[in-house]
Image (cartoon, helix red, strand yellow):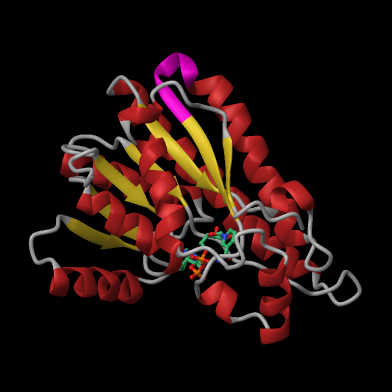
């Protein structure tokens, strides 16, 4: 069975939409009828992602922007612009993120700030900027990218799991706060997924991790995006405050 049109007439914003899991979410939302504004870390990478999609699908309504996600004024201005242009914002996928794996002994305090600025503060900034529009239009949904390390922690690079525990905290708290405004807030917690983030890990680490996955392999970005689609659609109309693991039953 082919599912079609789940996001017809919806307007979605996907942060970190230029590659990896974010790009898979962008494709999935477009396939299902949404208009998508993807955010990149630079305007050139956002434009390149849009150009790549347009080459394959010239008719897809996809646009690229690059606000500074850690700066509230930049984020607020960008959401204002999107709302003015498209008249609404139904879905926000807070996906941009960076990881770390230094031991505590080598961890630079400024790198801890960097990871918190993107993985946590950007999520706060985007949610704060979009919520008034969603409330005004009678509802919407926010989906955050967490990680399996938000459940198990991680043996090195403590800033990354700390940031993803915070993502879960924001998800559960905002779900409770914004439910009355018709805004659902959920998170997807991927396990090891085949993206640049995985490619940056040493081979022996990837092999070790894969061996510990009951399904025997890392996830594909599309398999993560499928769950974003479910959570963004009417099929999840009573799902909020959930942290959905998509990790092949990995136990860290
Ligand atoms: P990726 O490195 O392929 O993509 C990261 C995205 O974030 C890119 O689009 C990039 O432009 C954006 N980004 C990076 N720095 C930015 C900045 N300073 N400002 C704005 N945007 C910035 O990574 P991915 O694997 O696709 O990761 C996407 C999300 O999934 C992240 O939140 C990550 O923590 C999470 N995650 C990934 C895995 C995995 O195994 N790949 C597992 C669990 C969770």
| Frontmost residue, 150 versus 230 | 230
| Viewer-closest of 194 and 139 | 194
Q: What percent of the width, then of the height, locates residue 73?
A: 44, 48
Q: Quadrant of the C terminus?
A: bottom right
Q: Is residue 212 left or right of residue 50?
A: right
Q: Where is residue 65 drawn, in percent x and y?
A: 31, 61
Which residue is located at x 8 percent, y 60 percent? 59
- Residue 107 is situated, as x and y percent measured from the top left of the image, at 82, 72
Q: Is residue 40 above or below residue 28?
A: below
Residue 106, image quadrant? bottom right
Picture quarter with the N terminus: top left
Q: Residue visible at 32% across and 34% down?
A: 233
Question: Which segment did they paint magenta?
Answer: 179-184
Residue drawn where x is 49% and y is 48% of the image: 72
- List the single residue furthest toward the top: 180
Q: Is residue 96 above or below residue 194?
A: above
Residue found at the far bottom of this picture: 203
Q: Judge by depth and name the residue closer to the eye, 174 or 247.
A: 247
Instruction: Give the image quarter of residue 111.
Output: bottom right
Q: Position of residue 226 (x, y in %)?
A: 39, 49
Q: Quadrant of residue 25?
A: bottom left
Asked whether residue 74 appears in the rendered view, the answer is: no
- Horizontal side of 148 relative to 105 (left or right) equals left
Q: In this view of the protein, can residue 199 be seen by the observer?
A: yes
């Amino acid at each position: 069975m082919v599912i079609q049109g789940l996001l017809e007439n919806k307007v979605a914003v996907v942060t970190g939409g230029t590659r990896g899991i974010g790009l898979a979410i962008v494709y999935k939302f477009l396939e299902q009828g949404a208009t998508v504004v993807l955010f990149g870390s630079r305007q050139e990478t956002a434009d390149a992602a849009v150009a790549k999609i347009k080459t394959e699908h010239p008719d897809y309504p996809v646009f690229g922007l690059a606000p500074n996600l850690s700066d509230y004024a930049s984020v607020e201005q960008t959401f204002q612009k999107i709302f003015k242009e498209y008249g609404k914002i139904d879905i926000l996928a807070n996906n941009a993120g960076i990881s770390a794996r230094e031991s505590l002994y080598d961890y630079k305090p400024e790198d801890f700030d960097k990871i918190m600025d993107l993985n946590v503060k950007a999520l706060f900034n985007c949610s704060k900027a979009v919520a008034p529009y969603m409330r005004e239009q009678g509802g919407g949904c926010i989906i955050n990218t967490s990680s399996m390390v938000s459940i198990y922690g991680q043996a090195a690079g403590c800033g990354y799991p700390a940031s993803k525990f915070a993502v879960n905290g924001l998800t559960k708290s905002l779900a409770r706060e914004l439910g009355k405004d018709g805004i659902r807030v959920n998170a997807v917690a991927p396990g090891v997924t085949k993206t640049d983030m995985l490619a940056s890990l040493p081979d022996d680490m990837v092999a070790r991790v894969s061996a510990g996955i009951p399904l025997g392999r890392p996830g594909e970005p599309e398999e993560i995006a499928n769950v974003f689609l479910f959570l963004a659609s009417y099929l999840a109309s009573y799902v909020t405050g959930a942290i959905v693991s998509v990790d092949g039953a990995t136990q860290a």
